[in-house]
Image (cartoon, grey):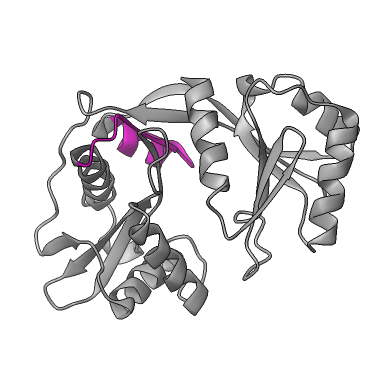
Amino acid sequence: MDLRIQRSVVSHLRTRSQVVEIGPFVAGLDPETTSPYLNYASPVPGAPITEADVTALIGAFRSAGRKPRFEYVCSSAPELEELLLAAGFTIEARHQYLICTPQSLTACPVPEGLRLVEPGTDPDRAAMAAAVGEAFGESWATDADIARIRRGQDRGGIALAAFTDGGECAGGGQAGPPQDRLSEVGGIGVREPFRKRGLAAAITAEVARRMFTRGLEIAWLEAGGDDSWRVYERVGFIPAGHRLYISLG
């Protein structure tokens, strides 16, 4: 499973607007933002890695004005962490990822007074981005954010927003365009007034369900804390492996 997840990550990076391939590394860069969460590299599973490869990758990031950063499944390149630490990288986090299949998925009811819809207009996408950004303490409703959601949908991904009957957006979530019949679920966020009602679980379950109806075999994600971990396990996600986040200041 680790190698399959890592291959899908690399395939996804190759669809980004700016792609840099150096030796065993594939980097996806976003010319519209310097955010390290949208500018990072990942290794091709099984490819040999040298110190020179790391040096070249650092140079490519510096030339692009971006912070050198990696996200990858740990077991897919077991020698990489030591090379990166030797080059001065610092570990940001090591997270366990979880997977869900059509067989393990558990449906979760949508709280009363809310409906889940795929935003089909930019105003609805902006409302979703603003609500999810608010949930994470960020501002995510720029034109670039809206365009990013639209592109993901156009490429086969899912965006799902929760609206009240009065049209207020309570939260949302997404799944990336499928790669190798897999998709990463992410950005599940619910605004404070709508929490503790099961909305995050309902969004997560429905995002996964919609992807499975399109023929996907596995949905995967990472939990950011104990609360989200419990939500995702309730939906039917189970632990499967570990990913490393590491960057160079």
Specify whether residue 39 is painted magenta: no
> Where is residue 30 drawn, in percent x and y?
62, 62
The residue at 84%/60% (across/down) is 63
> Where is residue 224 drawn, in percent x and y?
49, 42
The residue at 29%/49% (across/down) is 200
Residue 231 can be seen, yes or no: yes
Q: Nearer the viewer, residue 205 or 226?
A: 205
Q: Is residue 241 above or below residue 124?
A: above
Q: Is residue 144 above or below residue 85?
A: below
Q: Is residue 243 above or below residue 199?
A: above
The residue at 35%/33% (across/down) is 181
Is 237 situated left or right of 102 in this image?
A: right
> Where is residue 231 drawn, in percent x and y?
31, 38
Q: Nearer the viewer, residue 197 or 108?
A: 108
The residue at 29%/29% (across/down) is 217
Q: Nearer the viewer, residue 31 or 203?
A: 31
Span highlighted in magenta in the image: 214-233
Q: Is residue 204 above or below residue 62?
A: above
Residue 45 sits in quarter: top right
Is 52 situated left or right of 127 in this image?
A: right
